[in-house]
Amino acid sequence: MRFMILVKASKESEAGVMPSQDLLTAMADYHEQLAKAGVLLDGNGLHPSSKGWRFTWSGGKKTYTDGPFTEGKELVAGYTMIQVKSKEEALEWTKRFPNPGVMDGGIEVRPMFELEDFTPGEAIDRFREMGLATTK
């Protein structure tokens, strides 16, 4: 089972404040433990929303918006992807996740879809051929 750990953005991360050496060390230690256990798939930080953009659809119309975005509590500052055997194992790993903020921080953890979760068909076969959404 694959899980994505979403690191919530903070005022500091949205202002472009780089993580402290202590936080970088804690994150490196955590990710190193994940890697040694063979469960780390990927992980990285994201630039502030001021360097990004969005596309939204409403009524069939697509709208482009430059960042920054005001909904700070809904923004993502980084992510880690893991592959484990169960939800319980994912929970145990995420209990050890370092506080990603200076004072306040948060993560959200969600299971990822696997191709086997969808109704078989040509589109799913195409994703499989690309090597996407598959387990190791």
Image (cartoon, helix red, strand yellow):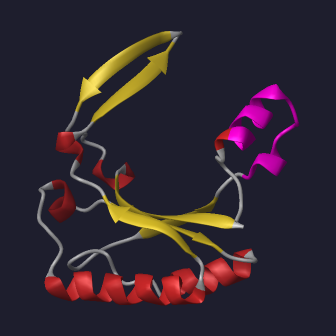
Residue at 57% in and 71% down: 82
Residue at 71% in and 81% down: 88
Q: State the residue lying farthest toward the front.
A: 129
**Front-lying residue, 33 or 61:** 33
Residue at 24% in and 83% down: 23
State the count of labels. Answer: 0
Q: Position of residue 65 (x, y in %)?
A: 27, 25
Q: Position of residue 51 (x, y in %)?
A: 18, 41
Which part of the image, by quadrant, shows the N terminus? bottom right
Say above or below: 96 vs 84: below
Q: Quadrant of residue 126?
A: top right
**Front-lying residue, 73 or 124:** 124
Q: Quadrant of residue 14?
A: bottom left
| Magenta segment includes 118 | yes
**Front-lying residue, 22 or 99:** 22
From the viewer's perspective, is 57 left or right of 17? right
| Magenta segment includes 123 | yes
Q: Position of residue 3 (x, y in %)?
A: 61, 65
Main secondary structure along the magenta-highlighted residues? helix
Q: Position of residue 95 (x, y in %)?
A: 52, 86
Say above or below: 31 vs 122: below
Residue at 44% in and 69% down: 107
From the viewer's perspective, is 3 left or right of 46? right
Which part of the image, by quadrant, shows the C terminus? bottom right
From the viewer's perspective, is 93 left or right of 131? left
From the viewer's perspective, is 116 left or right of 61? right
Q: Which residues are magenta?
A: 114-129
Q: Quadrant of residue 62?
A: top left
**Front-lying residue, 92 or 116:** 116
